């Protein structure tokens, strides 16, 4: 994923915002599409946050998380 | 010219010029060193003019109105600095005349619109957009710079006053802040740093530059070796040494800080914060913004942290805003 202009909340928020926006517009999203490079310092933080958000959405919609 | 006719002349200024349509019109002229040149600043209703075409136009019209002896001679951006003697004395006299004129709101209301012929040409009445002015300024039009100045100087002046703590007011002149903001803006604009989306205003940019200038100046004056809190006025009265609880100033400051922060957020982040400030719960916000609870909570948390950092830097604000408590 390319790094564009960083908002005041930082790049982590920018990535999550992109993920949320994609979800809000009904697209089929895969967490892996939004993760930075594995060696990126933000990798684990982004992964953790996206998983939490995805779990929340699936829990609320009753979708299996398996 | 009688006093009455002079007043009527002033109220006949066009309504579309904010700096001239103010009910209380005061005018003062002062000499100030600016970039090594001696130049004269004319201030009308708090707006400052320099030797720009607009300034010269206003000055000449004032001179012709209030000082008939100056007829035939005119001020322009070329001869501005070199003017001496008779005309200058006449011009100063005309300004002094104007200083004595005060227009009451009731007089303004009584004045029939047909009397408002205006001292400025009608071509000045349509207001171009900020985007257009910025483009014209980059193309070398000094008039565009003047218009931007006139459009925002007053608001910036108000911002500087609101954001300057009572302790700093003896050291910091709001006019200096305004000048500094415009100096920075025009320099960076010439370098091509700013872009204005169509329909947008430059005010947000001026607000950010202004707040940064004020913050820097406050930090400078509060540095330990020149700490402004150790400065006392010889004629300070009791009220000046007691803490002043000015809720209105604090509220305005807080509002401006929040508005400044909001401009830095994405649309959805902005919506989240605004809904929260309006008292909505996390669940409602998540539903309205189509974001997860987790994101709503995280966004609010980050905004609170940013706000706290900003508030610590702003005079008049000693505590965080009362953001409604929710389930986060």
Image (cartoon, helix red, strand yellow):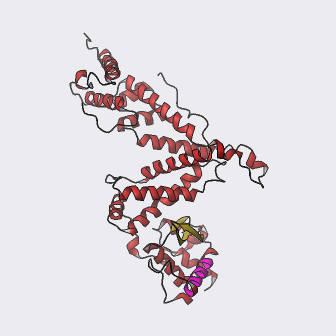
At 55% from the left and 55% from the top, the residue drawn is B158
Which one is in front, B87 or B19?
Answer: B87
| Residue B154 image offset from top left, x and y in percent | 52, 59
Main SS of the magenta part reads helix
Tell me, yes or no, whether the highlighted magenta stretch contains residue B94.
Answer: yes
Q: Is residue B124 visible?
A: yes
Q: Which quarter of the picture shows residue B268? A: top left
Which one is in front, A48 or B62?
Answer: A48
Where the N terminus of chain B falls, by quadrant?
bottom right
Q: Is residue B5 above or below residue B296?
A: below
At 28% from the left and 34% from the top, the residue drawn is A3
| Residue B319 image offset from top left, x and y in percent | 60, 34
| Residue B116 image offset from top left, x and y in percent | 48, 76
In magenta, the rendered stretch is B86-97
Q: Residue furthest top?
A: A66
Tell me, yes or no, whether the highlighted magenta stretch contains residue B229.
Answer: no
Q: In the rendered picture of this protein, how many numbered marks are placed on residues?
A: 0
Which one is in front, B215 or B109?
Answer: B215
């Amino acid at each position: 994923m390319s790094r564009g202009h960083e908002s005041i909340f930082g790049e982590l928020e920018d990535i999550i915002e992109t993920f949320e926006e994609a979800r809000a517009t009904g697209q089929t999203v895969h967490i892996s599409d939004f993760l930075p490079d594995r060696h990126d310092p933000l990798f684990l933080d982004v992964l953790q946050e996206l998983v939490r958000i995805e779990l929340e959405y699936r829990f609320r919609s009753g979708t299996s998380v398996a | 010219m009688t006093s009455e006719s002079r007043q009527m002349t002033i109220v006949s200024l066009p309504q579309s010029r904010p700096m001239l349509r103010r009910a209380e019109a005061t005018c003062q002229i002062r000499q100030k060193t600016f970039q090594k040149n001696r130049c004269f600043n004319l201030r009308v209703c708090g707006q400052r003019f320099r030797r720009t075409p607009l300034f010269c136009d206003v000055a000449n019209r004032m001179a012709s109105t209030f000082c008939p002896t100056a007829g035939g001679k005119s001020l322009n951006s070329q001869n501005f600095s070199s003017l001496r003697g008779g005309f200058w004395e006449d011009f100063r006299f005309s300004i002094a005349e104007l200083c004595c004129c005060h227009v009451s709101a009731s007089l303004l209301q009584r004045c029939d619109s047909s009397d408002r012929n205006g001292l400025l040409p009608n071509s000045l009445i349509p207001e171009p957009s900020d985007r257009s002015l910025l483009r014209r300024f980059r193309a070398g039009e000094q008039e565009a710079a003047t218009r931007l100045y006139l459009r925002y100087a007053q608001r910036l002046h108000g911002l500087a006053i609101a954001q300057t703590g009572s302790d700093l007011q003896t050291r910091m002149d709001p006019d200096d802040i305004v000048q500094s903001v415009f100096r920075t803006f025009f320099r960076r604009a010439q370098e091509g740093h700013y872009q204005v989306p169509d329909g947008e205003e430059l005010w947000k940019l001026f607000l950010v530059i202004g707040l940064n200038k004020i913050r820097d100046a406050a930090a400078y004056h509060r540095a330990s070796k020149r700490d402004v809190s150790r400065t006392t006025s010889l004629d300070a009265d009791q009220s000046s040494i007691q803490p002043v609880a000015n809720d209105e100033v604090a509220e305005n400051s807080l509002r401006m800080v929040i508005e400044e922060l909001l401009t830095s957020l994405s649309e959805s982040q902005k919506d989240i914060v605004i809904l929260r400030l309006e008292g909505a719960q996390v669940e409602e916000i998540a539903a309205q913004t189509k974001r997860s609870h987790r994101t709503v909570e995280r966004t609010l948390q980050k905004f609170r942290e940013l706000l706290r950092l900003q508030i610590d830097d702003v005079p008049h604000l000693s505590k965080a805003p009362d953001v409604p408590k929710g389930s986060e």
